[in-house]
Amino acid sequence: MDIISFLTGMAKISVFVSLLLAFFLLTVKTKNKLANRLFAFYLIFFAIDNSGIFIDEGFIKSHFNLEFFRWSVCTLILPAFYLYVLSVCFADFRLKVKHLLHLIPFIITNIVFVLRLYLLNTIEKQLFYDQRDQSPEMYILFLLLGIQTIAYSIGIFVVLKKYKEIYQENYANPRTSIFKWLFQIASALFVLYYLSIIKNIVRYADLDFLWIWSNTILQFLVLTVTCWFVLKALNYPELFRGIDSKLQLARDILPEQNENITEIKSNQNEGIVTQIATLKDYMKEKEPFLDPSLTIQELSNQINIPVRDLSVLINHHMNQHFFDFVNEYRIQKAMHILKDPLKRDLTVLEILYEVGFNSKSSFNTSFKKYTNQTPTAYRNAL
């Protein structure tokens, strides 16, 4: 098998797997329809773009306009992925009119193609296609895709940063699996995109051997990442849940920096001390932290402190994220159980569920953070 056959073979497999996963996401019954559909459209746009490697030359010559349109579809891949990330991070995300702005590169590209390509006769289209790499249209398209890559890579990682901060400040059991999934998939995708930019630069270096091998290596990575997407989507359905985007960070709730913060703190100091004492007493007596799904909103309802005030109280005045604050009580409870000789028969797994954790990894991480020991080592040292 020669290198060209190997390249086209991988591309066909990658396109088939992408379309298969897209079909699954579009047809599976789930509450997360929007996220699944956006990811499916991302995969479909990706498959259309990637199919260019193996499309028959004869078919292209008979359908030049369809091929030109296929080139423009690549401008929809990153917008679809960006909207997918938003829909996974925030459960209340809905598509709005403003999101049509993401179609601007696609629309502009097709307007240019209408004026410059679509209306040409067959001979002129053939001439353009044969010399496309040296055309200003392709230079502009590659430049547009490069700008898109930079802009969306920044935008997506800003969204992920916000998601992580909001979750830490408002939820007791941060679902790090979602953040890790999105961070990993975004990192893998943008590595491929930046490698694609390098590959397009090689296109103009007049080194056919290097061009073919760079295409082959990139296609192998594309196939690997696509298969990884499939395995993740099938094995971890919980990755498709989100949080409320209307939740605010404590720093956004606090007064503006140019106000007299010292005076405000002085006036409120006595009330803050009282609220902290009330909160700590409630945590010890009622043990709301035993609920693994406890959120700052639920704790706010229980203790009758407005959620905005409670967020500032914990995240700012007590200088802790909400999940750190809650997990500290859970760890103290776990330490008490581990010390109890009457509960020596309980396994670490049973204890972590009893005190409100929902995964062994998060329990071990939090326990070691507070004690510098694993739960098992702590118990054996007693």
Image (tube, rainbow, N blue to C red):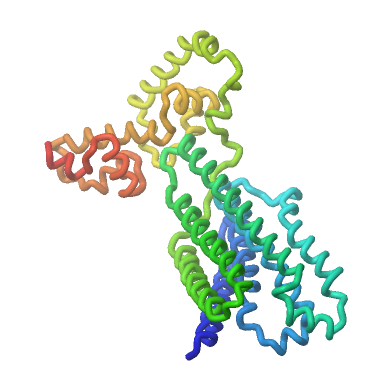
The residue closer to the viewer here, 252 or 70, is: 70
Q: Position of residue 124 (x, y in %)?
A: 84, 81
Q: Position of residue 197 (x, y in %)?
A: 59, 64
Q: Is residue 278 visible?
A: yes
Q: Say if 81 sits above or below 271 in the image.
A: below
Q: Which residue is at 48% across, 67% downward?
A: 225
Q: Position of residue 163 (x, y in %)?
A: 53, 43
The residue closer to the viewer here, 193 or 346, is: 193
Q: Is residue 292 left or right of residue 136?
A: left
Q: Quadrant of the C terminus?
A: top left
Q: Is residue 347 left or right of residue 162?
A: left
Q: Residue 370, located in which quarter of the rendered image?
A: top left
Q: Which residue is at 62% across, 77% downward?
A: 51
In this view, the residue farthest toward the front is: 206
The residue closer to the viewer here, 361 or 141, is: 141
Q: Position of residue 173 (x, y in %)?
A: 41, 42
Q: Is residue 310 left or right of residue 112?
A: left
Q: Which residue is at 71% across, 55% downward?
A: 102
